[in-house]
Image (spheres, rainbow, N blue to C red):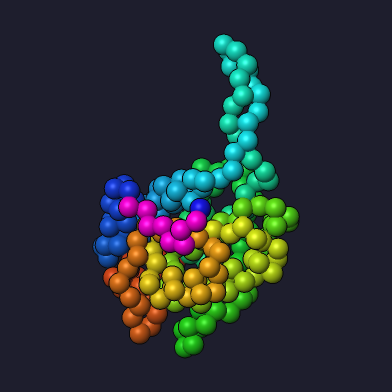
Amino acid sequence: MTDHLTVVDHPLVQHKLTLMREERTSTAVFRQLLREISQLLAYEVTRSLPMDTKTIATPMKEMEAPVLAGRKLALVSILRAGNGLLDGMLELIPSARVGFVGLYRDEETLKPVQYYFKVPDNLSERLVIAVDPMLATGNSSAAAIDLLKEAGATNIRFLCLLAAPEGVARMKEAHPDVPIVTAALDSHLNEKGYIVPGLGDAGDRMFGTK
Ligand code: URA
């Protein structure tokens, strides 16, 4: 994967995203759509994984069949909203290792504050896919990637549902080596750091909090 930003314009992704954006969509439906869309995005973010072959026997004959190469990949959820993307991805990649980075956004400064960090071992030998639905200012995403690099990760991809141009620019400046995959690139951030038109607070919408 070489492009810094990939917008997944698949019709199913775009249709599901529209339903998720709608204010009147219920928590249950929002969560289900996020699960479905995360699998479609997972398909894209894993598109260029290195492959190997192994010898298997079909009922007909032996063959050299393709398999994923190397160590199990690591999915890292940026709490708490990242968990919404994580669940669906794990259904598709059940043997992935899982990590969590806990960052909350100080609503005054919009700066990230760390409260939890637990990741799989041998991070340097794994593809690490960091997931967070909303790439807004990019401050918490860039901080999460800093922590993953400090823990040894060298091959990182970032998966989100929506991105703001400000967040993409921040990530490109801080981590030009980390490709971003998203379902849409929205217009801008408002004065509170929310993506416009966006979908509101992703965590609140998936967990039914306010
Ligand atoms: N986080 C969200 O949940 N929504 C936004 O629009 C921005 C950050």
Q: Is residue 180 above or below residue 70?
A: below
In which image quadrant can residue 114 be found?
bottom right
Q: Main secondary structure of the magenta part?
A: loop
Q: How many marks?
A: 0
Question: Is 99 placed above or below 104 here?
Answer: above
Q: Residue furthest right?
A: 122
Q: Quadrant of residue 160?
A: bottom left
Residue 188 screen position, x and y as percent: 33, 75
Q: Could you say where residue 19 lies in the image, as x and y percent from the top left?
A: 28, 56
Q: Is residue 29 visible?
A: no
Please determine whether, in this image, residue 61 is positioned above or below residue 94.
above
Depth order, front residue of 24/11: 11
Q: In this view, which residue lies farthest toward the front?
A: 2
Q: Looking at the image, which residue is at 35% across and 78% down?
A: 189
Above or below, 57 against 137 in this view is above
Compared across the picture, whether 37 is left or right of 72 comes to left
Could you say where residue 50 lies in the image, as x and y percent from the top left? 59, 43
**Bounds of the magenta span?**
2-9
Give the percent coordinates (x, y) of residue 36: 40, 48
